[in-house]
Amino acid sequence: MAPAASRAGRPDGKPSDRYGAPRPWTRPLTVTVIVALAVVGGGWLLWAALHHAEPDAVARLDSYEVVADRNEVKVTIRIERQSGVEVTCLLKAQAADHAIVGEREVTVAAGGDEVVVETYLIETERDATTGVLSGCKTSRPD
């Protein structure tokens, strides 16, 4: 049994006697708010997943060829796109030390084929060792 001095500062009884009874509406309100946030968050997550599941265009680097005697790189890219989508890609040439020694932005206009394979020439400031497809963005002309 604990000494009387250690129990002197503590009131005996249930927590509701010490702190008061909780309001009857707080628990249902808390549960309702949590459920509403979960439904809204889940809906947004579903929308985001479906919206980005099928992009307007997909591009890839098919090949590159370094033309050493002219400080140029030939880059061939393949773009698969939905009809009516304009695609703008950034092509880069890299040197052996991974420095960017040349770049070119190319645009494939809307209309035409849904699969486009094109070869572009990138002029470089010094010898390059590789060609890179840095990324593409899409737009739908008005």
Image (cartoon, rainbow, N blue to C red):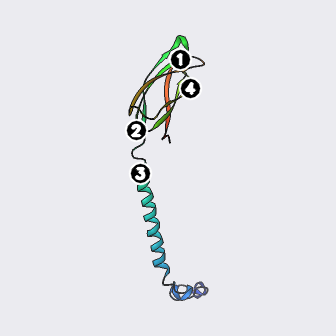
Query: Does the CB distance between marks 1 and 2 fall below 8 Å?
Result: no
Q: Most extreme residue toward the front, as rendered?
A: 142
Task: Name which residue lies at 52% across and 13% down.
Answer: 68
Q: Tell me what residue is drawn at x 53 percent, y 27 percent.
A: 92
Q: Which of 126 and 12 is in front in this view?
A: 126
Residue annotated with mark 1: 72
> Is 71 located above or below residue 37 in the figure?
above
The three-letter amino acid code for the residue at tag 3 is Ala
Disc on res. 49 = 3
Asked if disc 4 and disc 2 are in contact, CB closer than 8 Å, the reply is no
Q: The residue tagged with tag 2: helix, strand or loop?
A: loop
Mark 1 crowd level (few <14, some 14–19, many ≥20, 10 Å Cα): many
The residue to which callout 2 is attached is 83
Question: Which corner quadrant of the image does residue 47 belong to?
Answer: bottom left
Spot occupied by residue 131 in the image (x, y as percentages of width and height): 49, 24
Relative vertical location of residue 138 with respect to residue 119 in this rendering, above or below = below
